[in-house]
Image: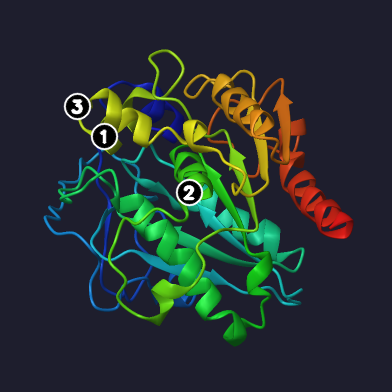
C-alpha cells in the first residue's frame, strides 16, 4: 500500500511508530540514520492538551509512516558545510500520519547538500484523542519555530531567516502557521514561547488549502476538524481566508495531475496573497502526481527545491 493510494482512498485509517520516548534502533521502514539525528522534544514538560489515545496498527500499513505522536519533536539534520540558514520541514499525511521519509529525510538530504540545516517536525495528529483537535498541529508548528530560534546560537543559524516548507496536509499546517503565527492556541509556559513564531519565508508544496468538497482533501478535513465541522470551524482553519499584510512571502509548487489534492488549492492561496498584495511565487508542473517530495529526477517537478531556494536568495538580495 503506497502513500498515494492511502490519500486517494476514502476513509483511510492508520497507525505506526509511537513517538514519545527515544528509541534505540530505527523503526521498521525508516532508515537507520533517522535515529542518529539529534532529537529535540518540543514540550519537555509534556504538550498542551490531554486525551491522547494510541491507535492500533493494521498489519498491512506502511511502516515508514509515523503515527501515535504522544510527544512531538524535531529531528535535526546538520550539513557538512553549514551556511547559517535553516529550514523547518513539515511532512504531510492527511493529518492521519507523518510521511517522514519523502517529505522529511529526503528533503533534509537535498537541503543539507546545499548547506541548509534542516529540522523535520513530527507533530501531533488531531484525530488521536486530543481535546482541541483543530489547534494541536498549529500548537506544535508555532512551538517548532520558537524552539529553533531559541537554539539558533547552538547551531550557528540566523534566526531571522528561518524558512518553513510544508507538504500536503503539512502544507495546510505551514499555511496555517503563515497566517496564524500570532494566534493564541496555547498558554505561554517559558521563554521559548516568547520567541517570534512568524517564518521568514514559507514554501507550500502540493498543499491542502480548501476544505470545499471536490477541491480540498476530505480525509485531511475530517481528521483535523472532525466528522461534522460547522461553518465557523471550517473558516477558522481555512488559511487563504486569513492572509493579511503580515503574512510572510509564500512559494507554491503543485502538479496539475495531482489526483489527491487538486492544484486549485495552490491557486486559491496564490490569489489570496495577490489580493493582499503579499509576495508570492507559484510553479505548476504538468506531471508529478501527489506526494512526490523532492520529485522524481526525470520530471521537471524535481526542480522545485532549487527554485524555492533561488526565490529566497532573490528576495533576500532585493531587500
Dot 2 corresponds to which residue? 91
Of residues 245 and 212, which is closer to you in this image?
245
Other residues around mark 3 within 10 Å, as few (<14) / some (14–19) / many (≥20)? few
- Is disc 3 placed on a helix, strand or loop? loop
- Location of residue 318 with respect to 192 vertically, above or below: above
Dot 1 corresponds to which residue? 225
Task: Report whether residue 66 is seen.
Answer: no
- Is disc 1 placed on a helix, strand or loop? helix
- The residue sitting at 64% across, 19% down in the picture is 256
- Location of residue 134 with respect to 101 vertically, above or below: above
Which quadrant holds residue 60? top left
Which quadrant holds residue 112? bottom right
- The residue sitting at 72% across, 32% down in the picture is 282
- Location of residue 78 with respect to 60 vertically, above or below: below
Numbered label attached to residue 227: 3
Of residues 3 and 277, which is closer to you in this image?
277
Task: Find the distance from the CA under tag 2 to the CA under tag 3.
Answer: 23 Å
Amino acid at each position: 500500500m503506497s502513500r498515494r493510494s492511502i490519500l486517494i482512498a476514502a476513509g483511510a485509517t492508520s497507525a505506526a511508530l509511537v513517538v514519545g520516548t527515544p528509541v534505540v534502533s530505527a523503526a521498521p521502514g525508516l532508515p537507520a540514520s533517522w535515529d542518529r539525528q539529534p532529537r529535540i522534544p518540543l514540550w519537555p514538560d509534556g504538550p498542551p492538551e490531554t486525551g491522547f489515545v494510541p491507535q492500533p496498527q493494521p498489519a498491512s500499513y506502511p511502516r515508514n509512516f509515523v503515527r501515535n505522536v504522544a510527544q512531538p519533536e524535531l529531528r535535526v539534520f546538520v550539513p557538512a558545510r553549514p551556511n547559517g540558514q535553516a529550514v523547518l520541514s513539515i511532512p504531510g499525511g492527511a493529518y492521519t500520519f507523518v510521511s517522514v521519509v519523502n517529505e522529511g529525510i529526503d528533503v533534509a538530504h537535498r537541503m543539507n547538500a546545499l548547506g541548509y540545516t534542516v529540522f523535520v517536525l513530527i507533530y501531533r495528529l488531531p484525530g488521536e484523542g486530543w481535546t482541541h483537535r483543530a489547534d494541536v498541529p498549529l500548537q506544535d508548528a508555532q512551538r517548532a519555530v520558537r524552539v529553533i530560534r531559541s537554539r539558533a546560537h547552538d547551531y550557528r543559524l540566523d534566526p531571522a531567516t528561518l524558512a518553513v516548507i510544508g507538504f500536503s496536509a503539512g502544507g495546510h499546517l505551514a499555511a496555517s502557521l503563515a497566517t496564524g503565527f500570532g494566534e493564541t492556541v496555547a498558554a505561554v509556559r517559558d521563554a521559548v514561547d516568547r520567541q517570534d513564531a512568524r517564518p521568514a519565508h514559507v514554501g507550500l508544496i502540493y498543499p491542502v488549502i480548501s476544505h470545499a468538497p471536490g477541491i480540498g482533501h476530505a480525509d485531511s478535513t475530517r481528521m483535523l476538524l472532525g466528522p461534522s465541522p460547522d461553518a465557523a470551524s471550517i473558516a477558522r482553519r481555512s488559511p487563504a481566508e486569513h492572509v493579511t499584510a503580515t503574512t510572510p512571502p509564500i512559494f507554491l509548487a503543485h502538479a496539475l495531475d495531482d489526483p489527491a489534492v487538486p492544484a486549485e488549492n495552490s491557486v486559491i492561496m496564490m490569489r489570496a496573497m495577490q489580493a493582499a498584495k503579499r509576495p508570492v511565487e507559484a510553479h505548476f508542473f504538468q506531471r508529478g502526481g501527489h506526494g512526490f517530495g523532492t520529485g522524481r529526477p526525470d520530471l521537471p517537478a524535481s526542480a522545485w527545491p532549487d527554485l524555492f531556494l533561488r526565490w529566497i536568495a532573490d528576495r533576500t538580495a532585493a531587500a
